[in-house]
Amino acid sequence: MATIKLHAFVMSAPAQRVFATLYEKDLPFELIPVDIRSGENKKQPYLSLNPFGQIPALEDGDLKLFESRAITRYLSHAYADRGTQLIFEDSKKMAVMASWVEAEAHQFDPAALKLAWELVFKPMFGQQTDHAAVEEIEAKLENVLEIYEARLAESKYLGGDSFSLADLHHCPLIQYLMGSPAKRLFESRPRVSAWCADILDRPAWLKVVALKTSH
């Protein structure tokens, strides 16, 4: 098997989705750091891998991919015989899982990312948090988490009874928000809280946390 190359910045939430998938699938890979501080991602040769200049990009042999969720899907399908099964063979189960994958991308991520920016990254960069914005964003995220709480009364994980991409894709932003005042939004909902504890304690995700710490 040719060495998989992942061009990434380790603090990037989208990159962390891919790291987690690679670890879940037990796939060896080469990390090629991209210095976003100097704008390396907005220049060639990186733009030949991701024309939008965003993180991450993956090379697997002659295949070049960008967009983290497309990459995780590819790895899950192409290496279905390795590591954790992150997708389902049954078409109905796959369709249900796909619905929750889309929910993460279009319902959870927009609010969670904005909240992480205000509560985690702005303070990190010495910027002032917009508390009015935080209040508005939290209300949107709470609506999503209420739906998650109801869903998790029906199955152990969002996509079904086993861990899948629908859960994995949430890990990066949940990890960041759990280190912020927004932690209470998750912990105040028993099923969501238990689900978060479960997915953030997976060995593959703990490897991602260790990778971040080492950089």
Image (cartoon, grey):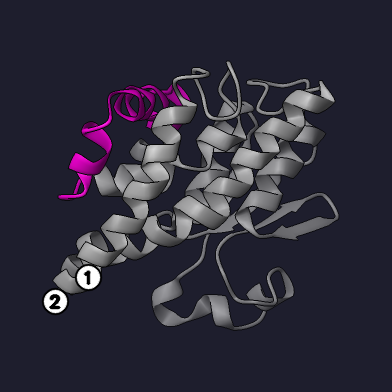
Could you say which is closer to the camera, residue 97 or residue 61?
97
Magenta-drawn stretch, dominant element (helix, strand or loop): helix
| Residue at image point 49% right, 17% down | 156
Q: Secondary structure at mark 2?
A: loop
Question: From the image, which quarter does the N terminus lie in?
Answer: top right
| Residue 34 vertical placement versus 42 (above, below) | above
Q: Amino acid at mark 2?
A: Gln
Q: Quadrant of residue 93?
A: top right
Give how far across and how far down residue 109 sits, in percent: 47, 55
Question: For residue 169: magenta?
Answer: no
Q: Are marks 2 and 1 in contact (CB under 8 Å)?
A: yes
- Which region of the structure is painted magenta? 179-206
Residue 202 position (above or below residue 127): above
Along the line of sight, the residue nearer the viewer: 103 or 201: 103
Question: Which residue is at a point 27% across and 66% down the rendered structure image?
Answer: 136
- Residue 138's spot in the image, x, y percent? 27, 56
Is residue 16 among the parts visible in the rendering? yes
5 horizontally vs 35: left or right: right
Alpha-carbon neighbours of circle 1 within 10 Å: few (<14), some, or many (≥20)? Answer: some
Residue at the image position 43 percent from the left and 23 percent from the top: 202
Q: How many marks?
A: 2
**Residue 194 at x, y percent in the picture:** 32, 22
Residue linked to disc 2: 128
Mark before the other along the chain sequence, 2 or 1: 1
Q: Secondary structure at mark 1?
A: helix
- Please state which of residues 99 and 164 is positioned toward the viewer in this rendering: 99
User: What separation in Å lies between label 2 and label 1 (alpha carbons)?
Assistant: 6 Å
Position of 191 with respect to 74 (left or right) is: left
Q: Which residue is mark 1?
A: 122
Residue type, mark 1 in image? Lys
Tell me the crowding category of disc 2: few under 14, some 14 to 19, or many 20 or more residues within 10 angstroms, Cα based.
Answer: few
